[in-house]
Amino acid sequence: MKDIKRIHIVGGAGSGKTHASRRISEKLGILAYDLDNIFWDNTDDSYNKKASPEVRDQKLKEILLNQSWIIEGVYFKWLRESFQKADVIILLMPNYAICTLRIISRFIQRKIGIMPSKKKETIKGLIELIKWNQQYNKEDIPDIVALLKPYNDKMKVFSKADEAVDYVNGTFSRSGAPRS
């Protein structure tokens, strides 16, 4: 397997993008970037204020100037340059029910203080995220696959984040079992 230094991970909420990017980052010593941090205006307490496209695009360009990076997020329409420059594009597609359980678990952990959060989350927001994620899986995933068709040679699809980690680390075999 060739040396992988630029990794783009895409998938819905609760698909394991952050888990995979953190594990790969730790193993390879490559900085990981969460696209939420450049897509949303982090000076606001809510989830609904987007950064301007100019600010967002400039932050992305700065990341892409690095020789190595891991970029993860649900976004895809404005990321063609990232997909072009990536050595591997990982699409995470776990079972929708698993993603929903992860979203709910993360919400509960944030509410009781186990997991830190800068944003004020509500039950209404949780329900909206679950509905959004269902739409994302039904409508956006096929659009992502179509957008990534020119990059089929470097696109890998996994149902589990740990499989993606094993693949990047060179321990994932074609049969799906870890190499010994």
Image (cartoon, rainbow, N blue to C red):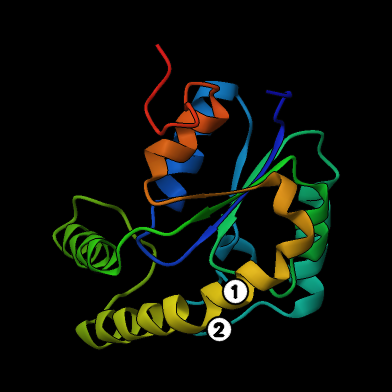
In the image, taking residue 82 as reference, residue 7 lies left or right, namely left
In the image, taking residue 56 as reference, residue 18 lies left or right, namely left
Q: Is residue 93 above or below residue 22?
A: below
Outermost residue toward the top in this view: 180
Q: Is residue 23 above or below residue 91?
A: above
Q: Position of residue 129 (x, y in %)?
A: 34, 80
Q: Quadrant of the C terminus?
A: top left
Q: Which residue shows up at 37% across the image and 46% down it?
A: 160
Q: Quadrant of the N terminus?
A: top right
Regarding residue 108, the answer to whether it shows in the image is yes
**Could you tell me how far apart the alpha carbons at marks 2 and 1 are, in whole angstroms?**
6 Å
Q: Which residue shows up at 47% across the image and 34% down it?
A: 165
Cβ–Cβ under 8 Å for marks 2 and 1: yes
Q: Which of the 4 image quarters holds residue 65?
A: top right
Q: Which amino acid is tagged 2?
A: Lys
Q: Which residue matches tag 2?
A: 49
Q: Which of the 4 image quarters holds residue 79?
A: bottom right
Q: Is residue 73 above or below residue 33?
A: below
Instruction: Count all numbered tags in the image, as a single digit.
Output: 2
Secondary structure beneath disc 1? loop
Regarding residue 46, the answer to whether it shows in the image is no
Q: Which residue matches tag 1?
A: 41
Q: Position of residue 38 (x, y in %)?
A: 64, 64
Dot 2 surroundings within 10 Å: few (below 14), some, or many (20 or more)? few
Q: Which amino acid is tagged 1?
A: Asp
Secondary structure beneath disc 2? loop
| Label ID, residue 108 | none
Dot 1 surroundings within 10 Å: few (below 14), some, or many (20 or more)? some
Q: Position of residue 142 (x, y in %)?
A: 56, 75
Q: Which residue shows up at 38% across the image and 70% down it?
A: 119
Q: Position of residue 89 (x, y in %)?
A: 65, 49
